[in-house]
Image (tube, rainbow, N blue to C red):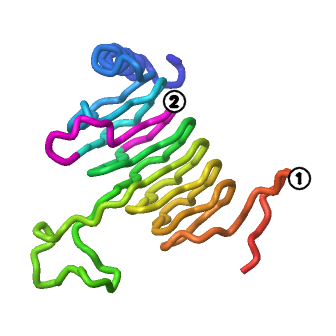
Amino acid sequence: MLKKYGFFGCFKLLLFFLRTKLFFNNARLIRFPFDVRNKKNILFGKSFTTGVGCRIEAYPAKGNLQKIIKFGSNVQINDYVHITAMSSVIIGDNVLMASKIYISDCSHGFYNGGEIDSSPEQHPIDRSYNISEVIIEDNVWLGEFVSVLPGVKIGKGAIIGSNSVVTKDIPANTIAVGSPAKVIKKYNFETKKWEIVKK
């Protein structure tokens, strides 16, 4: 470890570890700074690990004491991951996230051509919230700069490529890339290979 991180790096890790056990005793290691808003509404699973500069924020309805952000066991998120929820963000076991990822179950306004679309003349901060549950199942890997938007379910074992924007459900055991993210490969359990999905 000394060879990998150096003396000061190891000393910093020790401080992070002690602070983690003091404030997040269920976690494995949290690197600070770590911004948590409404901790009482967040469930941190066993062996939770973070990079630096992560921001986890829960904004439930007034009086709601339920956990609206839930992390499974062995979740690892890297530097500057931002997760926000007003209703429900559920992250399964063994999920790995690269850096600078954004996950949210809410956005300012409605823009889908429905009856309650938000007007561009209205200030964005004053627009009604569009809130819809996000579920990220077990063994998912999210690449660098991925955004996961409201109402999305990412299936077990899926991989989301760097810089992708997930706007719709991604099936289990697939690889999706792009903005919006589209499935390009699916794992074949018979051949034990990732196979290109024909369009």
- Circle count: 2
- The residue drawn where x is 51% and y is 57% is 153
For the question of whether residue 151 can be seen, the reply is: yes
Residue 164 or residue 117, whichever sits in front: 117
Q: In this view, does 141 lie above or below 47?
A: below
- The residue drawn where x is 53% and y is 51% is 142
Magenta stretch encompasses residue 75: yes
Q: Is residue 120 above or below residue 109?
A: below
Residue 108 or residue 12, whichever sits in front: 108
In the rendered image, residue 15, in percent from the top left (x then y), is placed at 32, 16
- The residue drawn where x is 24% and y is 37% is 35
Residue 178 left/right relative to 71: right
In the rendered image, residue 161, in percent from the top left (x then y), is placed at 57, 60
Q: Which residue lies furthest to the right in this view?
A: 191
Where does the magenta region start and end? 59-79
Q: Residue tagged by mark 1?
A: 190
Q: Is residue 131 above or below residue 135?
A: below
- The residue drawn where x is 37% and y is 46% is 81
Q: Residue tagged by mark 2?
A: 73
The amino acid type of the residue labelled 2 equals Ser
* Figure quadrant of the C terminus: bottom right
